[in-house]
Amino acid sequence: MNNGEKWKANPETDSGIATMKELVNRFTGNENINAYHDLRSELEKEFNTIIEKCSMKGEAHEQLHNYLLPMRPVFDSLSSDKIETCKTAFTQIKNHLAKYSDYFE
């Protein structure tokens, strides 16, 4: 937190996170391993767009990266050949995205 306040994020980051949340919320491929693999591709595309369009500076920028970077290994788990690993990764991503508004505005 920024002295008890949320960090200011740039509009591109807010939009990218909103899109990622939407992708997760409309996901229906619970038993289809290829659907998890496709979801990973869509999430990573949005993630990379956030990184590319990041115009944030200073500590807010550092805190954004602290928030974003833990998602990378979870994306890898969405490409697993084991459905249970994919399901666990999906839950982790969904929970992580839900926490964005706890730290950023």
Image (cartoon, rainbow, N blue to C red):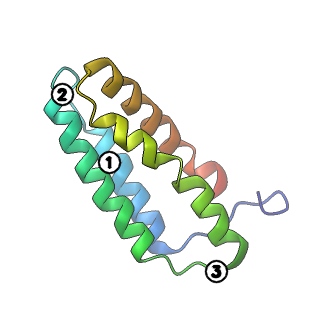
Q: Position of residue 28 (x, y in %)?
A: 20, 30
Q: Is residue 105 visible?
A: no
Amino acid type assigned to the residue bearing label 3 in the image:
Lys
Amino acid type assigned to the residue bearing label 2 in the image:
Ile
- Residue shown at 47% from the left, 67% from the top: 13
Quadrant of the image containing the N terminus? bottom right
Q: Is residue 99 left or right of residue 82?
A: right
Q: Is residue 64 visible?
A: yes
Crowd rating for badge 3 (residues with CA inside 10 Å; few <14, some 14–19, many 20+):
few
Please determine whether, in this image, residue 24 is positioned above or below residue 32. below
Q: Position of residue 11 (x, y in %)?
A: 47, 73
Q: Nearer the viewer, mark 2 or mark 1?
A: 2
Crowd rating for badge 2 (residues with CA inside 10 Å; few <14, some 14–19, many 20+):
many
Q: Secondary structure at mark 1?
A: helix
Q: Nearer the viewer, mark 3 or mark 2?
A: 2
Q: Earlier in the sequence, mark 2 or mark 1?
A: 1
Quadrant of the image containing the C terminus? bottom right
Query: Which numbered circle lies on residue 57?
Result: 3
Label 2 belongs to which residue? Answer: 33
Q: Secondary structure at mark 2?
A: helix
Q: CA distance from mark 3 to mark 1?
A: 27 Å
- Residue shown at 64% from the left, 49% from the top: 102
